[in-house]
Image (cartoon, coloured by chain):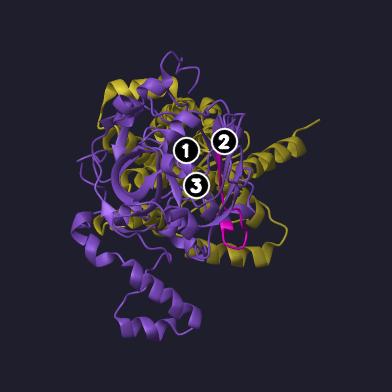
Amino acid sequence: MGVVLYCDQSRVIVAFTAPMEPCLVHPFSRAASVVRRVSNLLFPKPIIFIACLIPLAVLAVAGVTDNLGANPIEEITHETGEWTLRFLLITLLMTPLRHWFGWGWPIRVRRMLGLFSAFYATLHLFTYLWLDQFFWWEEIWYDILDRPFITIGMLGFVLLIPLVLTSTNAMMRKLGRNWKKLHRLAYVIPALGVVHYWWLVKADIREPLLYAVLLGGLLGWRYYRFRATRPS
Amino acid sequence: MMIKIPRPSDALTSEITPESVYKERRRFMQAGVAAAGLAGLGVSLQAHSAISLGKIAKSPYSTDEAPTGYEDITSYNNFYEFGTRKSDPAKNAHSLRVHPWSVAIEGECAKPGVYTLEDILKPHGMEERIYRLRCVEGWSMVIPWIGFPLADLIKRFEPTSKAKYVYFETLNDKEQMPGVRWPILDWPYVEGLRMDEAMNPLTLMAVGLYGKTMPKQNGAPIRLVVPWKYGFKSIKSIVKIRFQEERPVSSWEKATPSEYGFYSNVNPHVDHPRWSQRTERRIGEFRKRKTLMFNGYEEQVAHLYAGMDLKKYY
């Protein structure tokens, strides 16, 4: 796997051994190491890569078999949007997973999951630009200016771009400490996504609320850890 | 999406149960031998309700645009009492009991009372009205409704001079409507029209579409259709009509007054914060089309709003 990178709270560790376990001391060493090995076997990167393409495949099959309902463009827009949000949250779940269970794989696939978030966000955006508006730029510009949920969605997408561009190992090394700072946008972007969804729904806020609660949990855990580990 | 449905006029005679047969059927049902009896008569059970549509006349108010497919009209619905996803009503509305059905007529009129659906429909001849329907969410359909003018119904109850508005209410029953277990809206769903809007010849009480009785997910057994207003004004499964002096507050207006006004006329010049109202997607079409003022019914209804600032009264 070549160079494996592992980003800790305060520093970026570059390791030249592969595959690498995160530097982590876990209390239940023996049992945990068995679970760790099994989980590493169960979740190799290629399998997760393929799993990440399942939502797209399901959508494609539904499209080809004319199973997207009466308003297929709306359905594609909603599905790609929801999967963007799900991938953003799944990406944020990787660090806690590593911490709770001592698994190595979550950190190794975290970047890939982040990139899949951007992949589905791109599909979502192009569904809107192409299928929905058919590059009717006047209407699109009008939408961005006048419809707050689109404004905030666009902002979220724009913020994803630097994260994608700096996701390579070379950029990580080049940016050093700033890379970490920049990639804290991974906490901001899902929040924009939740607001984007919240402002879209007419009255039934149950689903966006669920995403908000999950995001709150993921960010809350980080805040709690930050408070707990900060030297007083 | 691709399903081709014959023009309603092709199917009318074969699909409508003659009144004599219908009465016959009721007697059999009351006798409790409905299934055997109907099989013997060679009459198919109408899936949606026990009412008969009789002879259906054509209307000059119908558009000549191609109607949206039956499958799309009956699978893509906003009927929050059965769930908030578009596909929910088609899945869940089977639990709605449309027979027996009654409508309470209340308020400022000479003949209030609770009327059975049969009583409500009896004196009215049915018409087919092929109308555009524009949803506030930016999509539209063309629907061949079956119904009769609301004005004709209103006249029967002799509203008094105090009757300035008409209030409508949808059934609100947790047992039949899984969606009302959640306080998504302040149930029951209510709507209202100004008296002159209600009396406009375009305003329809619909009991069917595509030559058949109303599918449950489309608001069986009786619903309102106001084609120049956003779809949510066309209240479904009506159980109460009240004539009143003060303006009713409709459900969406109550939920979000800044987004949904009482009038809610289709108006490409007044934007909704979530949906551009300048364009719409006709279900079944790929490219969006421009939305028309009053959904293309300007000629028939613009005079109702003469002198009103429609940006203020949205």
| Residue with the most extreme right position | A232
Chain given the colour purple? B
Residue at 60 percent of width and 53 percent of height: B172
Chain given the colour yellow? A
Residue A70 x/y as whole percent: 32, 50
Q: Are marks 2 and 1 on the same chain?
A: yes
Q: How many neighbours does mark 3 have within 10 angstroms: few (below 14), some (14-19), or many (20 or more)?
A: some
Kindly state the secondary structure of the residue where label 2 is placed.
Answer: loop
Nearer the viewer's eye, disc 3 or disc 2? Answer: 2
**Chain to which the residue tagged by mark 2 belongs:** B
In the image, is A10 to the left or to the right of A61?
A: right
Q: Which residue is mark 3?
A: A86
Kindly state the secondary structure of the residue where label 1 is placed.
Answer: helix
Q: Which residue is mark 2?
A: B250
Q: Nearer the viewer, residue A182 or A192?
A: A192
Q: Callout 1, which amino acid?
A: Lys
In the image, is A66 to the left or to the right of A78?
A: left
Residue at 24 percent of width and 42 percent of height: B285
Q: Which residue is mark 1?
A: B233
Kindly state the secondary structure of the residue where label 3 is placed.
Answer: helix
For marks 3 and 2, give the CA distance: 35 Å
Q: Is there CB contact under 8 Å for labels 2 and 1?
A: yes
> For residue A100, which quarter of the picture?
bottom right
Compare marks 2 and 1 and give the one earlier in the sequence. Answer: 1
Q: Which residues are magenta?
A: B167-178
Q: Callout 3, which amino acid?
A: Arg
When the figure is inspected, residue B80 is found, relative to residue B43, above or below; the finding is above
**Chain to which the residue tagged by mark 3 belongs:** A
For marks 2 and 1, give the CA distance: 8 Å
Residue B292 x/y as whole percent: 30, 27
